[in-house]
Amino acid sequence: MKQGLLIVDVQNYSINKNTQHVPGLIKKLIEKNHFPVIMFSQFINTPNSQFVRQLNFTGCMRPPYSNIVDELRPWVKRDNVFIKNTFSVFANSGFERYLQEKKVDELVIAGLDTDYCVLADCFNAFDKGYKVTVVADCCASFTSGDAGHQVALEIIKDNLGTII
């Protein structure tokens, strides 16, 4: 199995008291494990997104809010950032092509929010046949804090993959 690390939406907008520890832990995870493939999803909201149309959420539309945090920038490459304006990076057709090109069949997932985008990516990865592993301490919930984080981890553990 070839692992790929998917770092979900660790962007300036999503850093608060609930999530501020995550970038440093992801950095340690990368340095310790030497993943053969590292990918990032980057949420950039747009005026026609469902977030604007249905939820009136207009945040995270431009830099510096939409930027991936500085601590993780050393691993950002020209071809490993997948922009989305949805919960899941799988909405970006280039993402799955990239996984196929790199022969990734297991996604190790870290990032934000555990109970929204991370969970959506786990559902999509599972449905598409990828093995799913979530690094619990490298995820958190900007929106609902530890309560939402823990509930999402239970859903993932019971239905979608492994929690480490």
Image: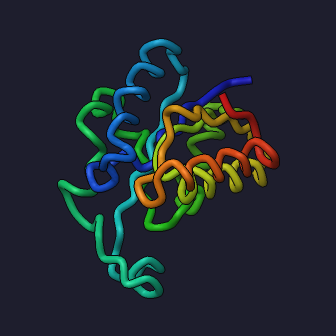
State the image coordinates of residue 7 (x, y, percent, origin top left). 47, 39
* Residue at 54%, 21% in the rendered image: 36
State the image coordinates of residue 111 (x, y, percent, origin top left). 47, 42
* Residue at 77%, 46% in the rendered image: 160
State the image coordinates of residue 138 (x, y, percent, origin top left). 49, 34
* Residue at 42%, 15% in the rendered image: 31
- Left or right of 112, for residue 116: right
- Foreground residue among 2 and 22: 22
**Vertical placement of residue 55 versus 36, above or below:** below
State the image coordinates of residue 135 (x, y, percent, origin top left). 58, 32
- Foreground residue among 88 and 134: 134
Question: Hey, which quadrant is residue 47 in on the image?
Answer: bottom left
The furthest residue to the left? 64
**Vertical placement of residue 39 versus 56, above or below:** above
Q: What quarter of the picture does the N terminus occupy? A: top right
- Left or right of 103, for residue 81: left
